[in-house]
Image (cartoon, rainbow, N blue to C red):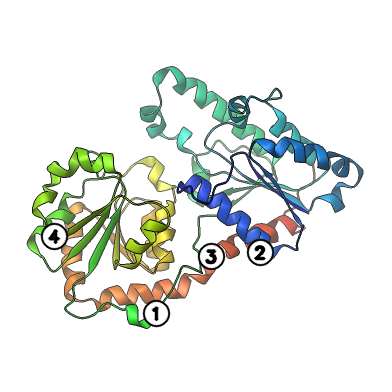
Amino acid sequence: MIVFFFPYELNATDDRPSLKRPLKMLDALKKIAKTGQVLELIGSSRDLKIKRIQPLIKNDPVRAIEFVYVESINKPLFLQRIFERKINIFGDYCFFWQCKKHNIPLTMFYRDALWVSKQFRDLTPKYTYYFLKVVFYIEFKVFEYLFDVLFLPSIEMAKVLPLGENKVVIDELPPAVDLDKYQFVETNKPKKNQGIVLLYVGNINPGFYNISPMVKVLENDTSLKLNLCCRKQDWNLFKQYYNFKYLKNVYVHHLVNDELERIYRQSDVHILLFAEEEYRKFAVPFKFYESLQFGIPIITNKGTKVASLVREMDVGWVVNNQAEVSKLIVRLNSDMSLVQKKKDNIARVIKANSWKARIEKVIKICTSSSYKISN
């Protein structure tokens, strides 16, 4: 039996990456594992199932549970249990300790290290910043002691975490793509003289994600089109800043979930620009793999983990500054074969980056004798 642990409720209609990822991993696990071999400890009802399997853990732990896989959340587990109004706020840690005591392999995807970055101070009220910083630190050290393997979105993230000299294995497990949604069809190749369709999904706050250079290109070349997807409140706040009302080739969308898929399929190049912050050096956004999922090459800026991935996979272009974005877009629009070359590269790397490949890596590591760490 493989135990899949996640403290939040899972909802297929929720568009947040923090919930989409666990759902994708669970679905992939259930497709690979034998029927009835996956035990889901999910949401507030997980305590009932934990009570049911405790006798199995005590009597025959090796045969009862092959390994436990945990998807972490963006708050300490004991705080989540307080929100759930549970009496035993340390119940999750106790379950992990019980598994460790009986030599059941424990592995966790540790999704976020925002709390170690300077950005965390800016995003957190000053009265709670120091409290959360200490709590996150203590919990991480508990995880480091209890777990055999810690998976991270990128190996660069390990450099900022307070890892000590112990037995925990660190490995990389970024997001992935749905092969079912990926369709690499020859007829979808860009056509000469048609003009590329750009895609921008995300924040348009000029203080953090200034897309003015891209807008300037659209003003000068009406053969270009832009699918712009952002939150409605952001649009209302910043549309005048960019003078969008004068641009006939910008199509604004406020979409989520499957609605967004249509816009991805209508676009040729995805613009992924980030502020050059410490956090971006190890963060792997869900949108990067979502672009690959629909066969869309990426334009991004230097100094980020996304830039490293774009170079490594050769699935897009890395620019040094905002001005280079404009020049690159003009060049791509005049020679669409450059876009197609990147699409071909996406087709080459796509299968190695599926959710199935991700869960297969987890199973391989957790069942390998070299990774089963004695306690």
- Split into 4 quadrants, where in the image is the N terminus? bottom right
- Are the residues tagged 3 and 2 within 8 Å (C-beta)? no
Instruction: Characterize the local packing of mark 2: few (<14), some (14-19) or many (20 or more) Cα atoms within 10 angstroms.
Output: few
| Separation of residues labelled 4 and 3 (CA atoms) | 34 Å
Say which of marks 3 and 2 sits in front: 2
* Earlier-in-chain disc, 1 versus 3: 1
Q: Secondary structure at mark 1?
A: loop
What residue is shown at x 39% (from left), y 27% (from top)? 121
Looking at the rendered structure, the kind of residue marked 2 is Lys
| Separation of residues labelled 1 and 3 (CA atoms) | 18 Å
Horizontal side of residue 91 vs 122, given as left or right: right
| Separation of residues labelled 2 and 4 (CA atoms) | 45 Å
Name the residue beneath numbered marker 2.
31
Looking at the rendered structure, the kind of residue marked 3 is Ser
Looking at the rendered structure, the kind of residue marked 1 is Val
Name the residue beneath numbered marker 4.
218
Name the residue beneath numbered marker 1.
185
Q: Secondary structure at mark 4?
A: helix
